[in-house]
Image (cartoon, coloured by chain):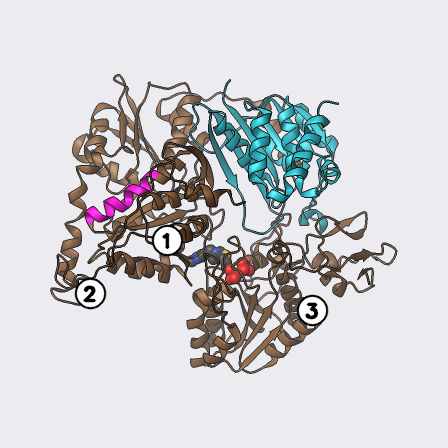
Chain colours: A cyan, B brown
Amino acid sequence: MADLNLIIAGVGGQGSILASHIVATAAIRDGLRARVGETFGAAMRGGAVASHVRIGKEIHAPLVPKDGAEIVLALEPLEGLRNIANFLGKGGLLLTNTRPWLPVDVNIGRAEYPSMESIKDAIDKLGGKIVEIDATSLAQQAGNVRTMNIVMLGALAATGKLPISVETLKQVIKENVPPKTIDVNLRAFELGLSSMKK
Amino acid sequence: MAKIADLIVEDAPGKRVLLMGNEAIARGAIEAGVGVAASYPGTPASEILETLALAAPKLGFHAEWSTNEKVAFEVAAGAAITGARAITSMKNAGLNWVMDMLMTLVYGGVRGGFVIAVADDPDAHYSSNEQDTRFAAFYGEIPCLEPSNSQEAKDMTCYAFELSEQLELPVFVRSVTRISHASGDVELGKIQKLDRKPVFDKHWKLPWRWNVYGPPGAVEKHRWLHDQMPKIKKLVETLPWNKLELGKTPSCGIIASGIGASYARDAIKMLGLEGKVAFLKLGTPAPIPERLIGRLLKAVKSVLVVEEGEPVVELQVKALAKDVNPEVKILGRLTGTMPAVGEINTDIAAQAIAKLTKRKLPQDVQREQAQAEIKKLVAPRSSTLCAGCPHLGSYWALKQALRKVGGKVPLVNGDIGCYEQGGYGIAGKEYKPSFSTESVRYPIEAPYETLDTNYIMGGGVGLMQGQFHAGYKDGVMVGVAGDSTFFHACIPAVINAVYNKARGLFLVMDNTWTAMTGHQPNPVTGITATGEATKVLSIEEVAKACGVEFIKVVDPYDLKATTAAIEEALKSDKFAIVVARHVCTLQAQRQKKFVGKRMVFDRDKCTGCKICVSFGCPGVVFKEGKAGLDPILCNGCGMCAQVCPTGAIRAEG
Ligand SMILES: Cc1ncc(C[n+]2csc(CCOP(=O)(O)OP(=O)(O)O)c2C)c(N)n1
């Protein structure tokens, strides 16, 4: 399988870093090399964050080149849009949560939040595909909103584009979430996985 | 996650794991049998000591968060003088605090290996500048190793201790954001157990080794230092991180140092140039392997230097070319082939390599236009303080007090910490330069527009004094700082204010953690780096001991009381300190100590005045002409209810 470039985008506090580390750790466990380039701000919540995940045999830099991502996994729609503009390659996939997290700039009326329609339109122009998931609701259904990132990982696994087995992913999730939350996280993963099969 | 805590001490040579660059540096020190590790937090370097602190109790070495980088450096240097292996780590700016000691320590060097790990931050993602640590290696006449990925970060750090002991000098490991905050697969090595007994000999190999003033004095010690680096000239030619792939008679070559090598490798592959250009991967920008580079310079007509930061390698290559092949063309930052400022990446390297090899990169004009259109739709996301952050309360109170008693143009000097966001501005807003000859007051639409000056840790309270002594009369003068910053850099400035009779308000926002860099403990937290209980210092007691006469302690969640205290301080004719103390909301939530109220929002009562929005909390949203609370972000701190003039927001019960 060829190298895979994936970007996990979101807002600080949504868990994009954990999600990217789970994917990379699972890749290493399945015998591949991995790189994760993180742009995480300070400890504060609310900034735009993106993790670049690269998996394969011949990879060096931790950042995905321009137009180089096969998949953008967006934990928040605006952050999806921000990252596809630069990084989504031709035929790439935007897998996005549908729940917006409004930036202050929008709240104080200094900027406008893009509609879902305009995001779909952008994907069309880039020759990509889009899949929307109400991952926040699914996470609530799993028992904890904070598992939204794991719901999205489930959805990502369902695309079949990851060169990693679902079993390895689940195992790494178990090892990387707080022990008391293993069950909700695995539920969240399954909900994400099955949401794509509908 | 207890995972990294276990993994980092696992003695499993050959095991492949995912490590962040900073974790890899820590692991390198652990494999080298480090005895003392000291640091002060700073992004993107903090995880080095955080990781070492997880391992320290298990392996029995010392790890600490010191009060600032200089102290940390001295703690580590002191250990190395007694023969222990020691590491200090810091962000780029931390090195500035360290320079005084560094420039003098090198005159006698060290006995145990001493590694100085510095994480630079090209593009200033988390910093106030883009300074390049590698220059300091020349200034201090010590070696500098520069990894290109996590594996090298570990291996080089481990080796740096050995090199340090061989030269009896400290050694730099220079990281950058894309190493420190990137992760990669790493094969673990063996953990050495050094049972070294600390020893001291004041004339070890050189008389008065550890005392620059002792005979034969500083000049002779400088001579000793000067003679050290030539000793490893040959050695660097054979280090595994310096490698020349000459290929078959290529006309172009690339010299790529540190992370630059990773970008260049990906770019070469992207351009299909594998094997068609000569490639010299460099891991030691100081000293460079002159023979290896010389071989390349003689073999090709032009060479591109790919490095992150200033043209440190490029300048040296140019100087070398003059001797070995003056005909060869050297491309890089100095020729404009690589950008002069900012961070590089694979695309930038590819463009430069295309120029070097006189090739055209494929272009898709239509796609670029589409991307430009899409970018216009992307709303900015200004970074904000967290929902319920106590700094929001402090800024609100400061704004109210300044409105009442601040004068025409009050001056607020910022400092470094989460509260520095008080000067980030609003991304969606355009700020134009002004050419007024008079003081100008600008409205504060959100707390993010509060800070008028901001540079470095401890800078604000000093600047304020200069403004006062210059005779600034158009408004009051304020300095703000956090608890960690207070101990790091503000105490001498506080004493100075008292001693030299400056006036003004120093607002200390004490959230009991060094929050911005990821919640490290500091002298007001009550625990050490390894989680041991320790004494809790009090900022007001320290201020009192420094001679400050006006001191008030308030809870910034109580907006009225905080406003009143600030007002009173501003009206006082003394240098005044207000300590706004409330534990960081994020940390309180994590430790399950946060008790939020259930907030209710009454849409009918909301007049859409946006006062709550201007409070700046990300938990307050505004849609269709009315405010609201984001149920996921709001944690019920209750501050917005205090600012709402119509009672539309209130706490239940
Ligand atoms: C010389 C230097 N060292 C370290 C840093 C990194 N740094 C940025 S913010 C900060 C934390 C300051 O903590 P505190 O003053 O308590 O404010 P808080 O973030 O908790 O609000 C640090 C250490 C820096 N910018 N400069």
Give left or right: position of B623 versus A5: right
How crowded pointer 2 is (Cα within 10 Å; few <14, some 14-19, many 20+) is rated as some
Q: Nearer the viewer, residue B77 or A78?
A: B77
Is B203 situated above or below B340? below
What residue is disc 3 on?
Answer: B559
User: Residue tagged by mark 1?
Assistant: B60
Location of the C terminus of chain A (image quadrant): top right
Dot label at residue B211: 2
Question: Of tags 1 and 2, which is closer to the observer?
Answer: 1
Q: Who's the residue at 59% across and 65% down the image? A: B440
Amino acid on which the number 2 mark rests in the picture: Asn
x and y, in percent, of residue B38 in the image? 38, 56
Give the letter of the chain under mark 3.
Answer: B
Q: Are marks 2 and 3 in contact (CB under 8 Å)?
A: no
**Could you give the CA–CA distance between mark 1 and mark 2, rounded to whole angstroms?**
30 Å
Q: Does the residue tagged 3 have its C-beta within 8 Å of any atom of ligand 1?
A: no
Q: Viewer-nearest of labels 2 and 3?
A: 2
> Spatial distance from mark 1 to mark 3, Cα to Cα?
47 Å
**Upstream in sequence: badge 1 or badge 3:** 1
Which amino acid, by three-letter code, is at mark 3? Leu
Magenta segment: B155-167
State whether residue B435 appears in this view: no
**Circles 1 and 2 on the same subunit:** yes
In terms of secondary structure, where does tag 3 sit?
helix
